[in-house]
Amino acid sequence: MAAIVGISGSLRRGSYNSALLRACVELAPRGVVITPASIREIPLYDGDVEAEVGIPEPVRALKEKIAEADGLLLVTPEYNNSLPGVLKNAIDWLSRPPSDIPRIFGNKPVGLIGASRSRFGTLLAQAAWLPVLRTLGTNTWFGERVLVGNGPSVFDDAGRIVDERTQAALMKFVSGFAEFVTGAANRGR
């Protein structure tokens, strides 16, 4: 059984990215479990807090979930043509102390998708994540791309995908990423 931790980079209740993550959970093939994890309780990174009290409990707990998982799925919004601050903040905390980076992220299969209101989807946000993921030493998957644009026409009021092309693209992505993660897990990463 392959385990993937999924993180939505949006805190908004009606987030298209959280809806996209829920759809991925439902589409996971047999033998693969995608478990959503929240970044809501992660405080703003502060080196003084780290020096005085160490790693906050919500960060420590998420680090352990990611370390134990076979893969990581980041579902990113795009804010001002770049990556979202709350998700970047979470990744910054998760990379502390630097000596923990190999244990948490080292060669970890990572998939990247996202949704936005823009007609271009999250193209620029996903591109902005690449140097971060490279720096962390992840094994980023470059298979199917999912750049959901025009969010209001893709999701209904309950957050379900109503656009057939998006549903088909997401199915292809989840299947391909699951195969990538399973292959990496079988090879011992």
Image: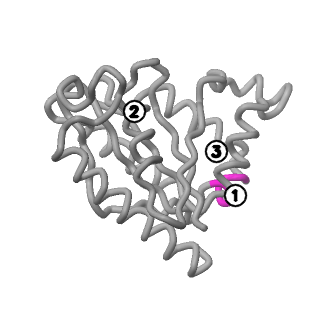
Q: Image quadrant for the N terminus?
A: bottom right
Residue 134 falls in which quadrant of the image?
bottom left
Residue 145, horizontal then vertical, whole percent = 26, 53
Task: Decide which of tag 3 and tag 2 comes sooner along the chain.
Answer: 2
SS for callout 1 = helix
What stretch of residues is rendered in magenta? 100-104
Q: Distance between the residues labelled 3 and 1?
A: 15 Å
Q: Does the magenta stretch include residue 108?
A: no
Residue at horizontal 28 percent and vertical 36 percent from the top: 161
- The dominant secondary structure in magenta is helix
For the residue labelled by badge 2, is the local secondary structure a helix, a strand or a loop?
Answer: helix
Looking at the figure, which quarter contains the C terminus? bottom right
Q: Name the residue under label 1.
A: 68
Mark count: 3
Circle 2: residue type: Ala
Which dot, 1 or 2, sits closer to the camera?
A: 2
Q: Is residue 136 left or right of residue 134?
A: right
Residue at disc 3, secondary structure: loop
In front of the other: 147 or 29: 29
Q: Mark 3 or 1, which is nearer the eye?
A: 1
Q: Which of the two labelled residues, at mark 3 and mark 1, occupies the earlier sequence position?
A: 1
Above or below for 167 versus 155: below
The residue under the point 75% across, 39% down is 60
Expressed as whole percent of the image width and height from the top left, the position of residue 38 reads 59, 32
Q: Mark 3 points at which residue?
A: 95
